[in-house]
Image (spheres, rainbow, N blue to C red):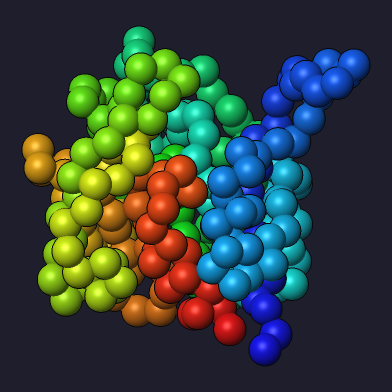
Amino acid sequence: MTKPLIGVSTYLEASARWGLWDLPAALLPEGYHRLVQEAGGLAALLPPDDPAEAARVVARLDAVVIAGGPDVEPVRYGAEPDPRTGPPARGRDAWELALTEAALAAGKPLLGICRGMQVLNVALGGTLVQHLDGHRGEPGAFGEHLVKPVPGTLYGGLVPEATGVPTFHHQAVDRLGRDLLPSAHAEDGTVEAVELPEGWVLGVQWHPEMGTDPRVMRGLVEAAR
């Protein structure tokens, strides 16, 4: 059986260290490509590029994953920055918004993880809560909290029971983007997953690549076959 090619967006850092080197680098925690591979896909890393190239890149892929990372710049959704919002990553914002829009236009399966869910919401005209408490662990460590699926949704079909998920975020969906539906909530009511009613488009606010539950990624890979 042919394995689908799953593109995963990456960081672009001014300084990264390995061995004797300290250089600018495109990088991604290994959990992302490992989860794609374990779910039956081939992983291709997509470093930030000219947004004009996004449609050409997406055309060569079977599905797209927008990975976690820094806060989306508030200007992207018409807001002033909260003092607790992190510094902008403008090149990554532009690239991932373009990838998201290209995947939606091409009808390709799309999974947004943490920041990726927020990028999906902003791409469709939604807004974000710039700070909330209780959804991340200590610096450099993931927390865990319960997520409850909405019955009858794509996510609810993949994971029908409430589950504990690895989490590290301080922002969340505020106003839902165009046509997006909430498909999971935290116990405090925070929207933890969103999806479109047509096709295979899902955003999750947690980090499945840091856990042991492969069902979300398996769903993407199956949709991409």
x and y percentages locating residue 39 in the rendered image: 54, 68
x and y percentages locating residue 92 in the rendered image: 62, 37
Residue 62 falls left or right of residue 69:
right
Is residue 179 visible to the viewer in this orientation of the structure? no
Is residue 142 visible to the viewer in this orientation of the structure? yes
Q: Nearer the viewer, residue 90 or 112?
A: 112
x and y percentages locating residue 15 in the rendered image: 75, 18
Residue positioned 22% across, 39% down in the render: 145
Name the outermost residue toward the bottom. 1
Against 73, residue 186 (above or below) is below
Residue positioned 17% across, 64% down in the render: 161
Image quarter (top left, top right, bottom left or bottom right) of the N terminus: bottom right
Q: Nearer the viewer, residue 214 or 101?
A: 214
Against 217, residue 203 (above or below) is above
* Picture quadrant of residue 168: top left
x and y percentages locating residue 158 in the rendered image: 30, 71
Name the outermost residue toward the front. 212
Name the outermost residue toward the top. 83
* Picture quadrant of residue 103: bottom right
Against 46, residue 12 (above or below) is above
